[in-house]
Every structure is written in C-alpha cells, then in structure tokens.
Image (cartoon, helix red, strand yellow):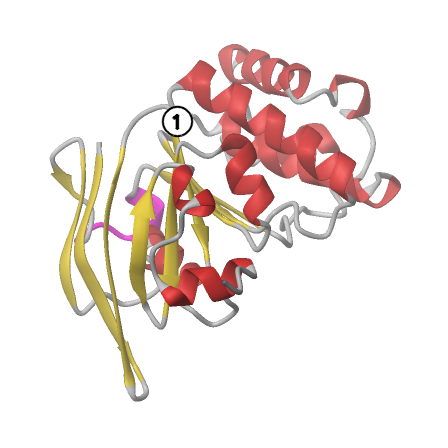
Amino acid sequence: MLYINRLCTHVPVQELCFSLTSGAGQITALIGSSGAGKSTLLAMIAGFTHTDSGTLTYQQHDLLPLPPAKRPITTLFQDNNLFWHLTVYQNIAIGLEPSLRLSAKQQALVQEVARQVGIESLLNRTPNSLSGGQQQRVGLARCLARRQPILLLDEPFSALDPALRFELLTLLRKQTDALGLTVLMVTHHPEEAMRIADQIAFIHNGHILEFGDKTLLSHPQSAELKHYLGHHN
C-alpha cells in the first residue's frame, strides 16, 4: 500500500499539500486544471521535487530519505524520453541495465513486455521510424520491464488521438491487474478516469479537494469540481 500523508512543498506564495492512499492493482487518476499541482505531486513521490514535510511510505517503508533511483517507482511522461539512436529493443533494455549487457533472463523479459504491449515486431527499428502511438508503447514497455511496483504517469497518452489513447489505456488497465501495480495517472480527460481508474483525486490549488471512486465524476460535491467538469447547475 502506498500512503501519502500531508506531503507538502512550498512554492512562491503557495503551499502544495497532498494526502491519499493507493493499493496494489489500483489506478488513481489525478484530475484538475493546469497548474493545480498534479505533476508536482508525482514529482514529489518520485523524488524529483523537494518535500518540506509529511510522510510517504510504501509497504511500511519510508521513501522520503531515498534518492529517486532507489525508490520503487517508474515514471512515464508525455515526452517518453526515448533514445533516438538506439533500437526499440535497446530502449526497453536500458531500463533494466544502462550498459545494455543483459542476462538471459533479462533478454527474455524484454521480449515478453514487447509482446505484452504489441511491439514485438518493432524491436529492431529505431524510434524515429515509429508512430506516436508506437513510441508510447515503447515507453510503457520500458516502464513495465523495470518491474517496479509503483508506476507514475504524467499525461503520457494525451497527444494521441482518442481511439489510440483508449487502446493504450486499456492495455495499461490490463497490465496493472496482471502485475498488481500501484498506478497514479495525471489526465486532463475525465473520460479516461471514468474508463480505467479505480479512484479519482480532484486537485485544486495545490490540494486534493475531492477523493473517491468514479461516482465522484457523476456526483461532484464541490463547486470547483462542478465547474471543472462543466456542470453549470
């Protein structure tokens, strides 16, 4: 279980502070306006942004003292950070071993995650020869290959057309269930949250204003969430 309790950081003229809980096999969607603090929350969990106070634990282990590389976390951004001079196989493999000297077990794992995300026929190609959707599949495969239990997604599919976006979201849901991942996903599309999320956090002005299951979207309580969703009654 991932526990976030009053995890706070200060930026000019504002304090951002978050609390939520997410378990294995759960996808938590983070929704809210641009600048609300969604990406900052992911950066604090990953260790990329300084935390002033609060607690962050996973399986009763305190993650805050750990540098980003030591946390049981993988992050996938909208810009999937692929290496254009490497093949698809190497882009996945580098998540396992930066030297690219893989054991037989690691080589088999690369092949397996490529099959799972539907890119096994692309392993010898380079990213610049792939479509945007294929590139995001490579980025997702690299995350899955690392076998870290916590996956943070910062709008990785937002630049894709709706049909492809939902295809990859369905794939994410399947892999979350199969691997028992704990997933936190930033999205600007409430319909994505409705489609695959187990729970939803509405972030407003650096705080979680509403938190619950999918009924949060059909029965918003706060004026702020009603406004965000376009409910004018």
- Residue occupying the point 21% across, 66% down: 8
Res 99 seen here: no
Kindly identify the residue that appears in the image at 39 percent across and 55 percent down. Answer: 202
In the displayed structure, 169 sits above or below 201; it is: above
Over which residues does the magenta segment extend? 65-70
Against 156, residue 180 (above or below) is: above
Which quadrant of the structure image shows residue 58? Answer: top left
- Residue 167 is left or right of residue 189, and the answer is right
Across and down, in percent, residue 50 comes to 27, 67
Residue identified by numbered label 1: 181
Quadrant into which the N terminus falls:
top left
Could you say where residue 211 lies in the image, as x and y percent from the top left? 31, 48
Q: Amino acid at mark 1?
A: Leu
Residue in front for this viewpoint, 227 or 138: 227
Q: Position of residue 3 (x, y in %)?
A: 19, 42
Packing grade of label 1 (10 A; few <14, some 14-19, many >=20) is many
